[in-house]
C-alpha cells in the first residue's frame, strides 16, 4: 500500500487550492515534507495556515491540486481517507477532548474503535501514552477536571495512540494560560526529538527556532517564503515576512 | 451537585447542616414583610393539612379496596395473572439493582419508597394474591438494592451484576410481551388498569426513542435531501394534529390503509394504539434529540474525524451520548407527558386506570366516591411520574462529572 520510495517526501502537496464559496483560502500551495522533518508554519491570521494543514487530513476538502500522504493520494475513495486519517494525528487549539469520557477513555477510544484493539490492550497503550505526556495519574478524571495544559497533553496522547506517522498541530498553545505553555511545548519537543514528522502552526518563536528544520511562511493563501530558521531570523527576503517577524518577535 | 457535604454523616447531622446552610430562620423572619408572609403561609399550610387529613380519615376508601384488581389490570382474568406478575417482579428487582449500582438514593427515592409502602400497607388490610404480589415486588427491589450495594466492593462481581442488569432491562419488554401472548392468552380487550397505561407508555418510549434517533439524524442529514424531507415531513405532520386525532385515526382509519400482511389490517385496537403512540412519541422525541445534537460543538466532530472514526462510530461513541446527556431533562419531560397522555385511550374504548375509576364511581354501590377515586388515581400517576423525575435527576447528578 505505502509505495513511498526512499527520499520521497511523506507529504507532497501540489498546487492546492481551497475555495470557500468564491473566496480562495488557498491559492495554489505546493510543499514537500520529508519523513522526520519538523516544519513550522508561520503567517498572519487568515492567511490559510489552518486550512492548509486541515487539507492534509481532509477536515477540509481541497478543490484543485493533489495531496499525497505517505504514498496515498487523497481522492474520493473513502478507504484512502480512512487510511490517511489513521496515519495523521491532529492537535487542535481548543483541545476538543470528549467531555463525556474519562481521560483514559479519550485516549483509548480510537485504537479500540478504529483499530479494533481489545479493551485491555487499548487501555495499556493509553496509559503508556499518558505516561509519555507526564500525566498518568489523571487517567480516571474527566477532561473538565484538568488544567488547560493537562488537557492539551491528553489531546496529544490521544492523537499519538493511533501511532501516526505524521502529527499536525494547529496553534496548540494559543488557548493556554502563559504558565502552561511550557509543559505542552516540552512534550512537543520530546516528540520532535523522537523523529516524528510534524507540521506545527505556532507563534512560539523560541520553540520554533529551536525545533524546526524548516519554516513555511503563509500570506493570503500562498507560501510566500520558506527556509531554515536561520534564513528567517537573519536573512528574510520578502517584505511581508520582515513585517510579520518584526511584529511577533 | 454537592448537596451532601459528608455523604456518610448521619441523617440528623445532614438535616442540621442543611438548616444552618439555608439559614432558614433568618430568611423567614428577615423583615416585617418576611414575617407576615411566613405567618400567612404557615396558617394556610396548617389549614390545608388539617382539612386534608380530616377528609382522608372520613373518606370512603372501600371502593379502592374492592376495585384494586381492576385498578391494576382491568378485567384481565385472575387465573391468567402469571402472564403479568413475573415481568413486574423482574422490574422491581431491576429497579433495586440499578439504583444500588448506579445511583446513591436521595430523599426523593425515600419519598417514593415511603409512598409505595403506604399504598401497600393499605392494600394489605385484606391479604390476597394482589397484595402479596405487590409486597413481593418491594421485597425484590430491596433485595436487588442490597445485593448491588454489597457488590460495590468487588469490581468483578459488580461488573458481572451490571452486565446482567443491563441485559435484563433490554429483554424485559420482549419477555413481557411473549408472556402476554404465548399460548391461550386472553385477548387484548381484557387488558386494563394502570397496566395498560404503563405498557403503552413503556413500549412507546422503548420503541419510539430509537425511531426518534433515526428521524432526528434524517432531519439533519445534509447529503440526502430525500431522507431529510421525509423525516421533516413526518415530524411536522405528526406534531400538526393532537394525539386524540391520531388515536381515532388508529382506531378507525388504520385498518383500511394497513396492508394485509400477517393480518396487520385486522390487528386489535391495543396494537394499533401502540403504533400510534410509538410514532407520536418518536416525532416529539426526535425534536428533543435534534436539539441535543445541535448543541455539540463542531470541534467534537473534527476530533473524531481526525482520529479516523467513521460516521456511525462517531454517532455511537461521541455525538449521541453527548446529545442524550444534554437533553435528559427535556426527554424525561416528554416521557412523563406521554405517560399521562395514555389516559386518552379511554376515548377508543380501552379501559385504562382512569376509566376503571370512572366506571367504579358510577356504580350504584359506590355513588359519591368520585373524589376518593380521582385522588387515588392521581396519586398513582404522581407516584410514577415523580419516580421518573427523581430517577432522571439522580442520573443527571451522576453524569454531572462527564458533561460539564
Ligand atoms: N469554513 C469556512 N468558511 C468560510 N471561510 C473560511 C472557513 N474557514 C476559513 N475561512 C477563511 O479562510 C481564510 C483562511 O483561514 P485559516 O486557514 O483559518 O487562517 P489562519 O489559520 O491562517 O488564521 C480566512 O479568511 C477565513 O476567514
Ligand atoms: Mg488558524
Image (tube, rainbow, N blue to C red):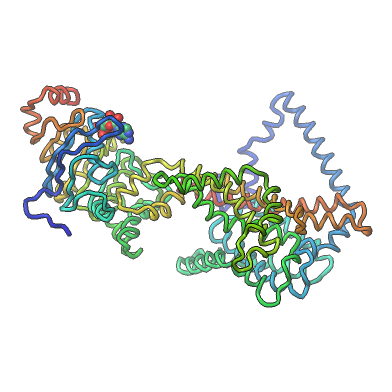
Number of labels in the image equals: 0
Describe residue B385's horizontal placement relative to residue B297 as left or right. right
Describe residue B100's horizontal placement relative to residue B244 as left or right. left
Q: Quick check: which quadrant has ligand 1?
A: top left
Residue A163 visible here = yes
Residue B331 picture location, percent across and down? 57, 48
Task: Write the residue at 28% across / 41% down.
Answer: A60
Residue B3 picture location, percent across and down? 57, 45
The relative height of residue B162 versus residue B376 in the rendered view (above or below) is below
Describe residue B135's horizontal placement relative to residue B144 as left or right. right
Q: Depth check: give the residue in front, B327 or B53.
A: B327
Describe residue B152's horizontal placement relative to residue A225 as left or right. right
Task: Write the residue at 68% across / 54% down.
Answer: B253
Residue B145 visible here = no
Task: Write the residue at 46% across / 41% down.
Answer: B294
Residue B307 picture location, percent across and down? 30, 51
Task: Write the residue at 73% across / 51% down.
Answer: B344
Q: Depth check: give the residue in front, B360 or A126.
A: B360
In which quadrant will I find the N terminus of chain B? top right
Residue B152 picture location, percent across and down? 51, 63
Single out the residue that lies furthest toward the bottom. B183
Q: Depth check: give the residue in front, A176 or A78.
A: A78
Amino acid at each position: 500500500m505505502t509505495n513511498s520510495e526512499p527520499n520521497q517526501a511523506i507529504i507532497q502537496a501540489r498546487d492546492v487550492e481551497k475555495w470557500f464559496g468564491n473566496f480562495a483560502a488557498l491559492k495554489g500551495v505546493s510543499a514537500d515534507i520529508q519523513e522526520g522533518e519538523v516544519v513550522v508554519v508561520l503567517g498572519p491570521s487568515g492567511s490559510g495556515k489552518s486550512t492548509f494543514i486541515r487539507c492534509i487530513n481532509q477536515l477540509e476538502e481541497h478543490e484543485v491540486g493533489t495531496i499525497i500522504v505517505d504514498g496515498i493520494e487523497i481522492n474520493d475513495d473513502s478507504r484512502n481517507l480512512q487510511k490517511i486519517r489513521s496515519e495523521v494525528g491532529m492537535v487542535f487549539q481548543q483541545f476538543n477532548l470528549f467531555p463525556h469520557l474519562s481521560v483514559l477513555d479519550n485516549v483509548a477510544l480510537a485504537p479500540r474503535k478504529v483499530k479494533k484493539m481489545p479493551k485491555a490492550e487499548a487501555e495499556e497503550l493509553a496509559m503508556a501514552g499518558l505516561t509519555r505526556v507526564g500525566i498518568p495519574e489523571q487517567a480516571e478524571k474527566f477532561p473538565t477536571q484538568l488544567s488547560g495544559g493537562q488537557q492539551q497533553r491528553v489531546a496529544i496522547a490521544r492523537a499519538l495512540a493511533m501511532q501516526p506517522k505524521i502529527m499536525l498541530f494547529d496553534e496548540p498553545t494559543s488557548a493556554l494560560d502563559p504558565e502552561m505553555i511550557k509543559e505542552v511545548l516540552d512534550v512537543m519537543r520530546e516528540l520532535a526529538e523522537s523523529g516524528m514528522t510534524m507540521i506545527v502552526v505556532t507563534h512560539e518563536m523560541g520553540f520554533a527556532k529551536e525545533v524546526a528544520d524548516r519554516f513555511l511562511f503563509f500570506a493570503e493563501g500562498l507560501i510566500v517564503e520558506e527556509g531554515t530558521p536561520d534564513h528567517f531570523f537573519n536573512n528574510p527576503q520578502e517584505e511581508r515576512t520582515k513585517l510579520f517577524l518584526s511584529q511577533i518577535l | 451537585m454537592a448537596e451532601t457535604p459528608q455523604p456518610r454523616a448521619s441523617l440528623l447531622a445532614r438535616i442540621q447542616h442543611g438548616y444552618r446552610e439555608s439559614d432558614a430562620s433568618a430568611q423567614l423572619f428577615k423583615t416585617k414583610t418576611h414575617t407576615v408572609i411566613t405567618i400567612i403561609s404557615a396558617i394556610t399550610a396548617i389549614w390545608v393539612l388539617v382539612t386534608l387529613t380530616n377528609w382522608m380519615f372520613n373518606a370512603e376508601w372501600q371502593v379502592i379496596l374492592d376495585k384494586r384488581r381492576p385498578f391494576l389490570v382491568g378485567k384481565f382474568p385472575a387465573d391468567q395473572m402469571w402472564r403479568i406478575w413475573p415481568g413486574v417482579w423482574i422490574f422491581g428487582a431491576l429497579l433495586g439493582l440499578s439504583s444500588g449500582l448506579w445511583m446513591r438514593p436521595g430523599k426523593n427515592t425515600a419519598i417514593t419508597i415511603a409512598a409505595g409502602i403506604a399504598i401497600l400497607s393499605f392494600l394489605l388490610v385484606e391479604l390476597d394474591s394482589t397484595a402479596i404480589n405487590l409486597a413481593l415486588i418491594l421485597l425484590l427491589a430491596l433485595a436487588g438494592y442490597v445485593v448491588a450495594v454489597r457488590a460495590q466492593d468487588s469490581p468483578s462481581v459488580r461488573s458481572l451484576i451490571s452486565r446482567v442488569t443491563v441485559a435484563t432491562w433490554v429483554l424485559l419488554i420482549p419477555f413481557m410481551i411473549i408472556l402476554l401472548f404465548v399460548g391461550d392468552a386472553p385477548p387484548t380487550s381484557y387488558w386494563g388498569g394502570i397496566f395498560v397505561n404503563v405498557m403503552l407508555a413503556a413500549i412507546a418510549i422503548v420503541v419510539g426513542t430509537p425511531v426518534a434517533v433515526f428521524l432526528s439524524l434524517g432531519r439533519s442529514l445534509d447529503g440526502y435531501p430525500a431522507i431529510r424531507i421525509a423525516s421533516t415531513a413526518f415530524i411536522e405532520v405528526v406534531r400538526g394534529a393532537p394525539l386524540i386525532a391520531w388515536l381515532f385515526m388508529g382506531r378507525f382509519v388504520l385498518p383500511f390503509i394497513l396492508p394485509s400482511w400477517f393480518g396487520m389490517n385486522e390487528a386489535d385496537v391495543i396494537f394499533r394504539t401502540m403504533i400510534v403512540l410509538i410514532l407520536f412519541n418518536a416525532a416529539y422525541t426526535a425534536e428533543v434529540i435534534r436539539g441535543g445534537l445541535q448543541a455539540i460543538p463542531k470541534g467534537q466532530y473534527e476530533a473524531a474525524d481526525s482520529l479516523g472514526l467513521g460516521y456511525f462510530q462517531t454517532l455511537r461513541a461521541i455525538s449521541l451520548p453527548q446529545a442524550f446527556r444534554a437533553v435528559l431533562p427535556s426527554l424525561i419531560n416528554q416521557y412523563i407527558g406521554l405517560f399521562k397522555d395514555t389516559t386518552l385511550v379511554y376515548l377508543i374504548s380501552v379501559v385504562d386506570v382512569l376509566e376503571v375509576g370512572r366506571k367504579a364511581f358510577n356504580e350504584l354501590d359506590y355513588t359519591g366516591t368520585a373524589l376518593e377515586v380521582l385522588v387515588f388515581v392521581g396519586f398513582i400517576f404522581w407516584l410514577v411520574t415523580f419516580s421518573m423525575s427523581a430517577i432522571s435527576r439522580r442520573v443527571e447528578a451522576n453524569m454531572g462529572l462527564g458533561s460539564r
